[in-house]
Image: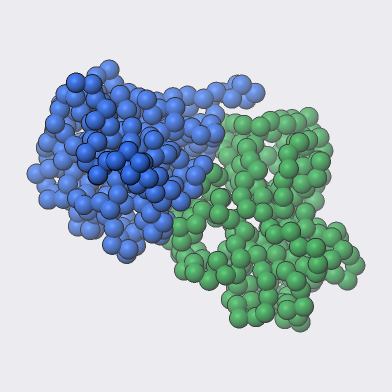
């Protein structure tokens, strides 16, 4: 396990914070670490900042993230990684589509060539909107508290997706599945970063698998062509015990 | 049971989801052993459930499983390609084991593997598998209940594994060995890394222990043996075969080599046999045992 001290904490909203730390490692956009809170649990976290200073951006959704988000500068974090296949390196025009905290893994890809589509449940869950160049970001919220009311598809309505050289997306599986169906058959290149329950992070436990591919090792980023053959995508997954259930 | 090669996927690695087992069969394994299934759903332990030790691995997943009633679907998905699927089961009593075995048989499993050896869950696995009387009772009852082959997977965490092997002699084959009970402490957190503290060590570090167990039991019994523990290349497979195994199970090595490992090892074995002038792998079973 690697350990580091938190150097800075940035509160992005009442429920989301970014924790910064020094870690001398080569991490690429889309990769993740397994973060351990001793005595509580271990969870996968995308790195939202991958320069000399690393960071992850956390929303509390369970006991481990809840403990993590309460940590302050000077306190110690434990993690292992980096794991997973990163997003491809694309220098030209990109469309970044992030659902909720999925924006964290897209954050390293924000630059002047990037256009953002942020899909959040509500106003206070919108992440990194101001980091895009002005006029190059659209926002949807499920409850209509900001931007366009509706889901990711509402935000895609007046966007010409074919004018981008690459689409990168990250978010809940249902959102990505809707996006996948929308993009299928169009002349686009896209890489979708999936989120599934993960226990080991190193390709042995089978918790995060989708049609025999391990999200933690073969993914979490998959191309449209790879997703085409995955009938479990958007339909079925395994629970913590390994019981097959619907994704919905 | 007929296998296209001696290479089987070991229980506990990438074998919870039917589609994963199917992919591993498609990519070269001769058969797969499922994750161990019990009579009721178990979530298993809270992560950390693994300690990444490079080539070696310490794990305490905690026998997480959906319960036998929810496993029929995974078996039928895995069997879609037509290769053997071996159903691993765990229980506390002979009755529980025989109930699970007949369920597995009804789902279409080609053989049963009795988990008498998981080292990290109270009341199951090696706690059951360290008691020769209970082992004999379990094997006898399961054999009486099902008509498919029954394999007993034994634990190295006992003083005398030969004694347990003799207790399990009604089994069609013995699988040797399961992981070795172990602990890892994180010196910066000042506590065990695994939430369960205790786990099972696998990987190259335990191969000599597995080879010793196969060697001893081959020398002292006439049982058919499936070798398991730390196999990551063709040399390891040949070593187990020469110690007395007829087939082997591979698990932890998938972490470093990926699912392609079965195809790679298969090709390397063929080259080895040709170069050494050996007609078939059967010729060298037990060839390394001192007479």
Quarter location, residue A128: bottom right
Position of residue A218 in the picture relative to residue B110 (left or right): right
Residue B119 x, y percent position in the rendering: 36, 30
Q: Is residue B278 visible to us here?
A: yes
Q: Can you name the residue that lies furthest to the right here?
A: A134
Check the rendered structure and report the hue given to chain A: green
Which of A56/B265 is in front?
A: B265
Which of B73/B210 is in front?
A: B210
Which of A142/A214 is in front?
A: A214
What residue is shown at x 56% (from left), y 38% (from top)? Answer: A41
Position of residue B110 in the picture relative to residue B193 (left or right): left
- Judging by colour alone, the chain drawn in blue in this rendered image is B
Q: Can you name the residue that lies furthest to the top here?
A: B159
Position above or below: B199 against A10:
above
The colour scheme is by chain
Q: Is residue B136 visible to us here?
A: no
Residue A22 x, y percent position in the rendering: 78, 35
Residue A164 x, y percent position in the rendering: 76, 73
What residue is shown at x 18% (from left), y 43% (from top)? Answer: B150
What residue is shown at x 32% (from left), y 63% (from top)? Answer: B81
Quarter location, residue B174: top left
Position above or below: B180 against A139:
above
Look at the image and tell me in which quarter the N terminus of chain A lies.
Answer: top right
Which of A204/B240 is in front?
A: B240
Q: Can you name the residue that lies furthest to the left here?
A: B144
């Amino acid at each position: 396990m690697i350990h580091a001290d938190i150097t800075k904490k940035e509160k992005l909203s009442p429920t989301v914070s970014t924790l910064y730390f020094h870690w001398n490692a080569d991490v690429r956009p889309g990769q993740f670490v397994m973060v351990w809170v001793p005595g509580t649990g271990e969870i996968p976290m995308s790195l939202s900042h991958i320069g000399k200073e690393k960071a992850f951006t956390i929303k509390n959704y369970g006991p481990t993230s809840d403990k993590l988000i309460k940590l302050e500068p000077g306190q110690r974090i434990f993690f292992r990684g980096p794991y997973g296949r990163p997003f491809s390196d694309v220098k030209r025009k990109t469309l970044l589509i992030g659902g909720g905290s999925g924006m964290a893994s897209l954050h390293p890809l924000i630059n002047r060539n990037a256009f953002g589509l942020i899909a959040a449940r509500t106003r206070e869950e919108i992440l990194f909107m101001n980091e895009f160049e002005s006029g190059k970001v659209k926002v949807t919220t499920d409850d209509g508290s900001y931007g366009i009311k509706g889901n990711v598809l509402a935000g895609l309505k007046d966007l010409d997706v074919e004018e981008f050289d690459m689409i990168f997306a990250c978010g809940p599986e249902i959102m990505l599945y809707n996006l996948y169906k929308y993009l299928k058959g169009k002349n686009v290149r896209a890489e979708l970063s999936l989120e599934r329950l993960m226990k080991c992070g190193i390709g042995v436990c089978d918790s995060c698998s989708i049609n025999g591919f391990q999200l933690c090792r073969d993914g979490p980023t998959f191309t449209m062509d790879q997703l085409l053959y995955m009938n479990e995508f958007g339909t079925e997954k395994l629970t913590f015990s390994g019981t097959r259930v619907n994704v919905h | 049971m007929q296998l296209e090669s001696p290479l089987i996927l070991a229980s506990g690695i990438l074998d919870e989801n039917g589609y994963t087992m199917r992919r591993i069969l498609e990519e070269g394994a001769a058969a797969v052993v499922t994750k161990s299934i019990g009579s009721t759903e178990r979530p298993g332990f809270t992560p950390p459930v693994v300690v990444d030790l490079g080539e070696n691995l310490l794990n305490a997943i905690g026998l997480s499983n959906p319960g036998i009633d929810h496993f029929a679907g995974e078996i039928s998905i895995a069997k879609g390609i037509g290769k053997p699927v071996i159903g691993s089961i765990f229980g506390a009593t002979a009755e529980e084991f025989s109930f699970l075995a007949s369920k597995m048989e009804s789902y279409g499993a080609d053989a049963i593997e009795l988990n008498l050896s998981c080292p990290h869950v109270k009341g199951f696995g090696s706690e059951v598998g360290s008691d020769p009387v209970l082992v004999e009772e379990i094997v006898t009852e399961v054999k009486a209940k099902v008509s498919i082959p029954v394999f007993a997977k034994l634990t190295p965490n006992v003083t005398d594994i030969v004694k347990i092997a003799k207790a399990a002699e009604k089994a069609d084959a013995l699988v040797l060995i399961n992981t070795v009970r172990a602990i890892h402490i994180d010196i910066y957190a000042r506590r065990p890394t695994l939430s369960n503290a205790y786990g099972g060590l696998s990987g190259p570090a335990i191969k000599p222990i597995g080879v010793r167990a196969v060697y001893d039991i081959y020398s002292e019994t006439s049982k058919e043996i499936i070798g398991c523990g730390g196999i990551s290349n063709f040399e390891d497979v040949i070593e187990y075969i020469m110690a007395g195994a007829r087939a082997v199970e591979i698990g932890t090595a998938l972490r470093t080599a990926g699912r392609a490992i079965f195809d790679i090892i298969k090709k390397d074995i063929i080259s080895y046999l040709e170069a050494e002038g050996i007609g078939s792998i059967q010729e060298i079973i037990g060839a390394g045992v001192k007479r």
